[in-house]
C-alpha cells in the first residue's frame, strides 16, 4: 500500500471529544460508544498516515461524507451500531491489504512414487549417458521432479520449451542460456552447447521440459547431442509427446534413429492414489472428509496441480473468514475456480 506522510490534509483531522457518552438509545448503547472510540482513533491514524481528506476517507469506507462526518465527530443523531459495523469491516480489509497478500506456500518437493520413477530415469540418463523420454498427464510432478533433480545434482541443466521456442534454432537458443553459453554466432550454437555438455567421465545431463512443443527436427537435434557429445538427455512432455514417438509413427526412417537411441521411455497416465494422499498430507490436511474430496479433485486432469490450487484458494478464503479450513471452503474454491469441463 502506498503510504504518504505529512500532507496538507493533516490539519483537517482532530480526534473528536470522547469524554461525553452518547445519548442512550437503540444502536447507541455504552458498548456502541466504546466501539466508536476505538474505531475513530484507528480511522484518525490511517487517514493522517495516508494524507486522506474526510471526503476521501468516507469514499474508502463507502459512506456518504455527511454521514461519516457526523459519525466521526460523535454528533450523528441516528444509530451508531450500523456505522460502527461498516467502519469495522473496512478497517479489517485495510489491515489485510496493508499486510500484503499472503498466498499459502505449496509443500516442499515430495518424493512420491511418480517422483521416484522420474528421478531414477533422469539418473540413468546421466550416468549411462543416454536419451530417455518421460511423458505423462499434467500435474503428476514431472516439472517438480526435474527442477529438484537439476537443483540437487551437479552437471545437470534444465531448459523449458514454450510454443515460441519450438523450432530447432529457438530451442538451441533456450538450451544455450540454460547451460551458460553466450554465443552470438548461430552456426556455432550446436558446437558451443555440445562442448559445454561434453564431460568425459563426469556425466552431464540436459533435461528438456515441455517437449510436446518441439518440432520433430528439434527432438532429433537432441539425439545428436547424445551421439556426438556423450551426454545424457531427458525429454519430458505430456501424453502427446509419447504418442508422437510411439511405434505407429516411428516406423519410418525419419524416426528410426530416434527410436533406437531412446534408452528408456516412462509413461505415467494417471496419478496413484497414494501419491495424492501423500501430497494432501503434506499440506497438513487431516480431516477425512476433506481428504476424500481432495482425492477426487486430484483424480481429475491436473492431478497434484488441481489439489494445490484448490487448497490455496480455499485457505485464502478461510483466512478472510478468520476460520480454519473447512470442507465448505474447499468445495467453494473448486466451484469458483471455474475449471471448465472438470466439474
Image: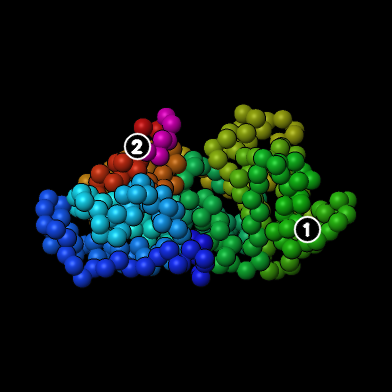
Taking the magenta stretch, the answer to whether it contains residue 338 is yes
Residue 38 location (% of width, % of height):
26, 66
Count the marks: how many?
2
Q: Is residue 171 magenta?
A: no
**Percent x, y of residue 307:** 38, 47
Quadrant for the C terminus, please: top left
Position in image of residue 133 (x %, y %): 60, 46
Asked whether, in this view, residue 39 is left or right of residue 201, the answer is left
- Which mark, by number, is residue 193? 1
Residue drawn at 61 percent across, 49 percent down: 209
Name the image quarter holding residue 191. bottom right
Dot 2 corresponds to which residue? 335
Q: Are marks 2 and 1 in contact (CB under 8 Å)?
A: no
- Residue in the foreground of this view, choosing between 13 and 113: 13
Residue 256 placed where, x, y %? Answer: 71, 37
Q: Which residue is nearer to you in this view: 290 or 145? A: 290
- Residue at point 30% right, 66% down? 16
- Residue 272: tell me if it is visible: no
Residues 281 and 19: in front is 19
Report crowding for label 1: few under 14, some 14 to 19, many 20 or more residues within 10 A (C-alpha).
many
Neighbour class for label 2 at 10 Å: few (<14), some, many (≥20)? some
Q: Residue at x 52, y 65 (%)?
A: 8
Classify residue 32 by image quadrant.
Answer: bottom left
Instruction: Identify the secondary structure beneath mark 2.
Output: helix
- Bounds of the magenta segment: 335-341
- Earlier along the polypeptide chain: callout 2 or callout 1? 1
Give SS at disc 1. helix
Q: Observer-nearest residue: 196 or 22?
A: 22
From the viewer's perspective, tell me whether residue 103 is left or right of residue 159. Answer: left
Work out whether residue 209 can be spotted: yes
Amino acid at each position: 500500500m502506498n503510504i504518504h506522510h505529512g500532507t496538507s490534509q493533516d490539519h483537517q483531522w482532530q480526534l473528536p471529544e470522547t469524554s461525553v457518552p452518547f445519548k442512550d438509545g437503540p444502536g447507541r448503547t455504552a458498548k456502541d460508544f466504546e466501539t466508536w472510540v476505538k474505531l475513530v482513533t484507528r480511522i484518525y491514524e490511517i487517514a493522517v498516515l495516508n494524507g486522506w481528506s474526510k471526503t476521501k476517507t468516507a469514499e474508502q469506507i463507502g459512506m456518504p461524507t455527511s454521514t461519516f462526518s457526523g459519525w466521526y465527530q460523535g454528533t450523528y443523531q441516528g444509530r451508531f451500531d450500523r456505522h460502527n459495523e461498516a467502519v469495522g469491516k473496512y478497517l479489517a480489509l485495510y489491515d489485510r491489504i496493508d499486510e500484503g497478500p499472503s498466498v499459502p506456500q505449496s509443500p516442499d518437493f515430495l518424493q512420491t512414487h511418480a517422483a521416484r520413477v522420474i528421478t531414477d530415469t533422469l539418473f540413468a540418463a546421466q550416468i549411462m549417458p543416454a536419451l530417455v523420454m518421460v511423458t505423462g498427464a499434467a500435474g503428476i510432478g514431472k516439472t517438480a521432479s526435474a527442477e529438484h533433480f537439476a537443483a540437487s545434482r551437479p552437471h545437470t541443466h534444465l531448459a523449458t520449451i514454450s510454443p515460441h521456442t519450438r523450432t530447432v534454432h529457438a530451442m538451441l537458443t533456450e538450451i544455450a542460456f540454460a547451460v551458460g553459453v553466450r554465443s552470438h554466432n548461430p552456426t556455432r550454437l550446436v558446437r558451443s552447447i555440445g562442448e559445454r555438455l561434453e564431460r568425459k567421465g563426469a556425466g552431464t545431463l540436459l533435461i528438456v521440459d515441455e517437449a510436446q512443443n518441439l518440432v520433430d527436427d528439434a527432438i532429433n537435434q537432441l539425439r545428436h547431442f547424445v551421439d556426438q557429445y556423450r551426454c545424457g538427455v531427458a525429454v519430458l512432455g505430456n501424453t502427446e509427446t509419447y504418442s508422437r514417438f510411439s511405434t505407429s509413427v516411428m516406423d519410418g526412417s525419419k524416426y528410426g534413429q530416434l527410436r533406437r537411441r531412446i534408452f528408456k521411455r516412462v509413461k505415467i497416465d494417471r496419478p496413484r492414489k497414494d501419491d495424492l494422499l501423500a501430497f494432501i498430507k503434506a499440506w497438513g490436511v487431516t480431516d477425512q472428509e476433506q481428504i476424500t474430496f481432495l482425492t477426487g479433485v486430484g483424480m481429475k486432469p491436473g492431478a497434484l496441480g488441481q489439489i494445490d490450487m484448490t487448497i490455496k484458494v480455499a485457505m485464502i478464503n478461510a483466512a478472510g473468514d478468520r476460520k480454519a479450513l473447512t470442507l465448505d471452503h474447499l468445495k467453494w474454491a473448486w466451484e469458483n475456480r471455474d475449471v471448465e469441463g472438470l466439474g
